[in-house]
Image (cartoon, rainbow, N blue to C red):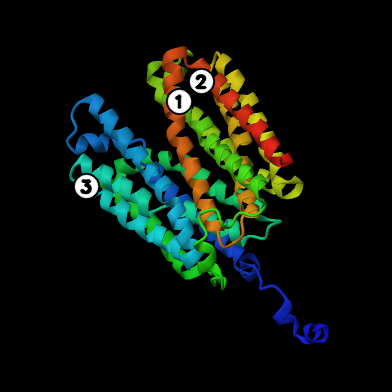
Amino acid sequence: MDNLATALPASATAAPPTYAARNERYWRTNLAICVFGSFTTLVSLSMLLPFLPLYVRQLGVDSTSAVVQWSGVAFGVTFLGTALTAPIWGQLADRYGRKPMLVRAAVGMAVVMSTIGLAQNVYELVALRFAAGLIGGYASASIVMIGTQAPPERSGWALGMLSTGVLAGNLVGPLIGGILPDLIGIRGAFFAAGAMIAVAALLTITLVREDFSLPPNHSVRARRGAWAGVSGGRRSYFALAVLFLTAMMVLLANMSIEPIITVYIAELDVDAHRLATVAGVVMACSAFGSMVMAARLGALADRIGPWKVIIGCLVGTAVAMIPQAFVTHWWQLAALRGVMGMTLAGLLPSIAKLVRQTVDERSSGKMLGYLQSAQYAGQVVGPLLGAAIGVHFGMRYVFFATSALLIGCAVLSAAARRGP
């Protein structure tokens, strides 16, 4: 038997190459396309912020309170749709490949965003925004592709670059949205957004490459349950739970105050005619800070380990939260939000890197999809928590409560790093 084993060729005894190894020659080009596609889709989703209330009024809603309510519903329902379907698209990516999910998201978003420009009433607007979340999710699909294609020693940097594209889209979108309707009209702005995503779809179809094949035992593994791909026993389950909770805290920390930040800035003696502009600058500082540091902190996670970056960023964000409760001028708040954005930037790339390391490649897409759902849950919970604390205790206590939650996550992350 020993002679028979040694007589076998190396190809018969060696393990098959991993998905990352098979796509080593493609991942850099794919990363560039994914960054561009994530940027364009996030621009399209965020550009309507300045004129969404105007469009709602144009669709027949008259009272100011109803305009505010429908605008909030129309904006938030997209992220609800994405949170619901991200694990499903991630599981399909494990079964059929990552590129088909990118193409599906880009083409679907291009069609839906253009169709929003044809809405005849506010119900159609909300339904189409919900559809954009259900069938879209280009950034989520990009995280699945790049998170599994990039070499493990470069995945933190690659995911940081991808995060930079998303953040840049969120930053630039409202600026474009403040200019474009005056040039081509509100409906024309949606057609332009659809055309921009169509360019990303065309680039994805023609330039993205993938070597994908199902493992021989994929169907057997798939029937073993949602967590079948997790290795390492209870320690890994606990680590994943902490990572999902921390992913939720990323957007919760940012969104706990942003929906009511204009009211907080008004308490800093900012003139009423400058209030909207100042609020926009303060919110942009957080996104800009994250955009500057995301790739750098992702690369740091590659060098020193993602758990260290996660714990450091959680503590740093918690510390940056506290002085925001004591500012006396708006520019102080802007500077502190910028610092907070920098510390938050290292979390998602490091979390995604760890999730990839914790599960095998048969389940990586599905687990990264769950990660996206946890992230969007923070976007929903954050404003609700911030509003409740602000109403009952005062807005300054929102910063204290958020800081305490971040410290709690840091403690859990330290425990997960050590293991049971």
> Do the residues bearing badges 1 and 2 touch, measured as CB atoms within 8 Å?
yes
Q: What is the number of the mark on residue 119?
A: 3
Counting from the top left corner in percent of width and height, residue 353 is at 63, 50
Residue positioned 75% across, 81% down in the render: 10
- Between 160 and 21, the one lying in front of the other is 21
Q: Is residue 63 left or right of residue 229?
A: left
User: Which callout, 3 or 2, points at the residue further toward the start of the chain?
Assistant: 3
Quadrant containing the N terminus is bottom right
Q: Secondary structure at mark 1?
A: helix
Task: Say which amino acid is labelled 1.
Answer: Leu
Residue 338, can we see it?
Answer: yes
Residue positioned 47% across, 30% down in the render: 382
Quadrant for residue 405, please give it: top right
- Residue highlighted by disc 1: 385
Vertical relation: 35 (above or below) 284? below
> Do the residues bearing badges 3 and 2 touch, measured as CB atoms within 8 Å?
no
Q: Is residue 135 left or right of residue 304?
A: left
Q: CA distance from mark 1 to mark 3?
A: 32 Å
Residue 98, can we see it?
Answer: no
Task: Say which amino acid is labelled 2.
Answer: Val
Vertical relation: 132 (above or below) 292? below
User: Which callout, 1 or 3, points at the residue further toward the start of the chain?
Assistant: 3
User: Which callout, 1 or 2, points at the residue further toward the start of the chain?
Assistant: 1
- Residue highlighted by disc 2: 398
